[in-house]
């Protein structure tokens, strides 16, 4: 993998991470199109997600600082931790199967269609009146479980978690922000685990791979910061469901190409 391939994949990750179109699905498809693309495990993908995770922290840095200084704020941070535990209960047993899906475009195509259907359904889910202070442990667990299912490439994490948040009664903008904040601890944990498990593979891949991965992570963080703001606005303005008309045709196209032997 070259430096510029790493940067371009990072930009792709940053643009698609917060949009309900599945960044992992786009990464999987893009990597399949790069001749000879290889990575130890899924460490490159994880580092790109770490970049967009940092974008969330930077965007919410003032809010997080306020939360740390109040009992109500620490309660919200506790709910995010609870949602992360729920996510892990679902995601960890599915990890090996999900990694295999990165090499199976048919699975990615089907998951993109499912994502599109979920996102389309948000047109009929008005959301509720529950904001930060009113969020319950049940809502946190439900969103966390949804995030755990989104470990599969093609199944949009933001799409399913925002849809579940809206269905659970969260305010539209808070449903989006809670979804993005919930991704941070999960990304941090996965990053640490993947680095530990693939140390030898990263050394074997050489300095070129490491440089490309770092550049990709930076590109993902910068582009993700702006994409995050776009998604919050689309959810608040009730046009979030329109992303379905991108996911569904793309998923159908991928499935058709695979079944057609391409």
Image (cartoon, rainbow, N blue to C red):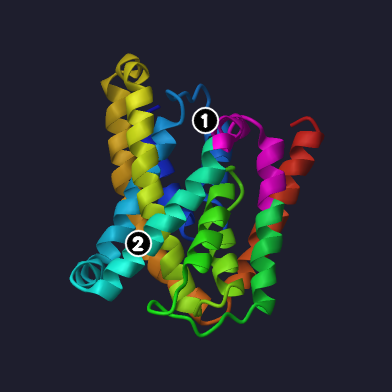
Which residues make up the magenta segment? 93-112
Q: Nearer the viewer, residue 96 or 4?
A: 96
Q: Quadrant of the N terminus?
A: top left
Task: Identify the residue at image location x=43%, y=52%.
Answer: 84
Asked whether, in this view, residue 242 is left or right of residue 148, the answer is right
Kindly indicate the quadrant of the structure image that contains residue 101.
top right
When asked about the image quadrant of residue 26, the answer is top right
**Residue ID for mark 1:** 34
Mark 2 secondary-structure assignment:
helix
Residue 209 in percent (x, y) is at 33, 26
Q: Residue at x 46, y 59 (%)?
A: 18
Q: Looking at the figure, which quarter contains the C terminus?
A: top right
The label number, if any, that marks residue 78 in the structure image: 2
Q: Position of residue 169 (x, y in %)?
A: 56, 78
Residue in the picture at 55% in, 32% down: 99
What secondary structure is the stretch in magenta mostly built from? helix
């Amino acid at each position: 993998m070259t430096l510029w391939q790493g940067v371009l994949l990072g930009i792709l990750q940053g643009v698609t991470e917060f949009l309900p179109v599945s960044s992992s699905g786009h990464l999987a498809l893009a990597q399949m199109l790069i001749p000879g693309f290889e990575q130890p495990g899924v460490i490159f993908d994880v580092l790109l997600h770490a970049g967009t995770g940092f974008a969330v922290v930077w965007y919410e840095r003032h809010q997080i600082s306020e939360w740390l200084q109040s009992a109500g704020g620490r309660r919200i941070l506790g709910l995010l931790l609870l949602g992360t535990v729920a996510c892990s209960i679902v995601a960890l047993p599915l990890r090996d199967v999900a990694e295999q899906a990165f090499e199976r475009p048919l699975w990615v195509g089907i998951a993109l269609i499912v994502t599109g259907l979920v996102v389309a359904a948000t047109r009929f889910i008005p959301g509720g009146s529950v904001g930060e202070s009113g969020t319950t442990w049940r809502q946190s667990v439900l969103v966390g479980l949804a995030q755990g299912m989104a470990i599969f490439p093609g199944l949009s994490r933001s799409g399913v978690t925002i849809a579940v948040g809206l269905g659970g009664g969260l305010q539209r903008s808070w449903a989006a922000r809670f979804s993005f904040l919930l991704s941070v601890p999960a990304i941090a944990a996965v990053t640490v685990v993947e680095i530990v498990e693939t140390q030898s593979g990263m050394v074997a891949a050489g300095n070129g791979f490491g440089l490309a991965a770092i550049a990709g992570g930076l590109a993902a963080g910068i582009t993700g910061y702006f994409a995050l703001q776009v998604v919050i606005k689309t959810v608040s303005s009730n046009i979030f469901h329109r992303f379905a008309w991108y996911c569904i045709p793309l998923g159908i196209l991928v499935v058709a190409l695979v079944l057609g032997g391409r």
